[in-house]
Amino acid sequence: MLAFTATTTSPPLVSTATGARLKVSAEKFPSFLPKQVDNIKDSFARKLASRIERLPVHVGFTENCIMSSVVKPSVQSNTSPVVLLHGFDSSCLEWRYTYPLLEEAGLETWAVDILGWGFSDLERLPPCNVASKREHFYQLWKSYIKRPMILVGPSLGAAVAIDFAVNHPEAVQNLVLIDASVYAEGTGNLANLPRIVAYAGVYLLKSIPLRFYVNVLAFNGISLSTSIDWTNVGRLHCLFPWWKDATVDFMISGGYNVSAQIGQVKQKTLIIWGEDDQIVGNKLGVRLHCELPDAIIHQIPDCGHLPHVQRPSSVAKLILEFIRENCKVEARCLSHH
């Protein structure tokens, strides 16, 4: 039975701002993480980072198995597993506040790093285009998750989720799309850049000033100390030596262009949108709601582009209610047969 009351125990965001003045607890981090993880003050990020592990995933596009970074569930459930993706050039640490709430509610929850980003071992660099990202995730699902999942995609992760659900419908029971970036035409003109220019652009992506500015755009009213710490969390995976090669490979490949796939999504979908999103406006959320064959939409007030970071209790509550409602519908269907 799911404990739906658990969503009231949302991590108070004030703790992320005041954490800088508190003694940081001594988590044991996996040895493969960049050593700068020790500088992160956010206790939720530290706790989730300590749970990251690498699983071997065999794929058809390279002879080497890929040691792939995930956070595995600590609880088993009879309901469908919830699998959390992340946005462009990010990692599973995006879920540092919402992941524990979903687990507390009794959900079997995975957080998975998309190939090319996060904390997987890409020293023998595989291709990081859309097709390889899809196959890598499919093989990970087939080897370890093994059941139809509730697939959650924020920002560009929503494009990853739509592409995956259309190509592998047997693996996806439902979709949850959060401030979905699904109408961009891939990486656009960036795909035509000379490789040396692409590398210069990617180097800028890693820079602290740009990451800090993106935080200012993405979140409403967070303190300076919190913004600096969240910048360090957001760029931690950029410190691997292969990160720039993987990101350039994705950019030059053309990226995601899923607008034509939206109408092919068969799964019932929950759309969540921050009302004050300065990156992907909520008019696009309304458009997505109209174009998806079976979707419901909920907007979160006073919230920017990443509700699962800024309003974790609201996001967890919406996901839990969506799952509960679908369980009721399934039970009614079974009782009629």
Image (cartoon, rainbow, N blue to C red):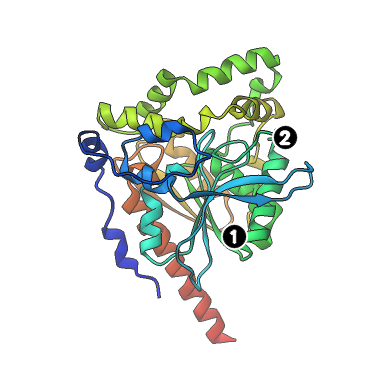
The kind of residue on which mark 1 rests is: Gln
Q: Earlier in the sequence, mark 2 or mark 1?
A: 2
Q: Quadrant of residue 115?
A: top right
**253 versus 336 height, above or below:** above
Question: Which one is closest to the eye, mark 2 or mark 1?
Answer: 2
Q: Residue at x 24, y 36 (%)?
A: 17
**194 versus 134 height, above or below:** above
If the image is split into quadrants, where does the C terminus sit?
Answer: bottom right
Residue 36 in percent (x, y) is at 42, 31
The kind of residue on which mark 2 rests is: Pro
Q: Which mark is residue 70?
A: none
Q: Residues within 10 Å of mark 1 (few under 14, many from 20)?
A: many
**Residue 267 visible in image:** yes
Residue 201 in percent (x, y) is at 57, 17
Contact flag, marks 2 and 1 (Cβ < 8 Å): no
Q: Quadrant of residue 143?
A: bottom right
Give the left or right position of residue 9, taking residue 39 as reference. left
The residue to which callout 2 is attached is: 127
**270 versus 183 height, above or below:** below
The residue to which callout 1 is attached is: 267
Q: Residue at x 32, y 29 (%)?
A: 227
Disc 1 on helix, strand or loop? loop
Residue 294 in percent (x, y) is at 55, 58
Give the left or right position of residue 138, taking residue 69 as reference. right
Q: Nearer the viewer, residue 221 or 42?
A: 42
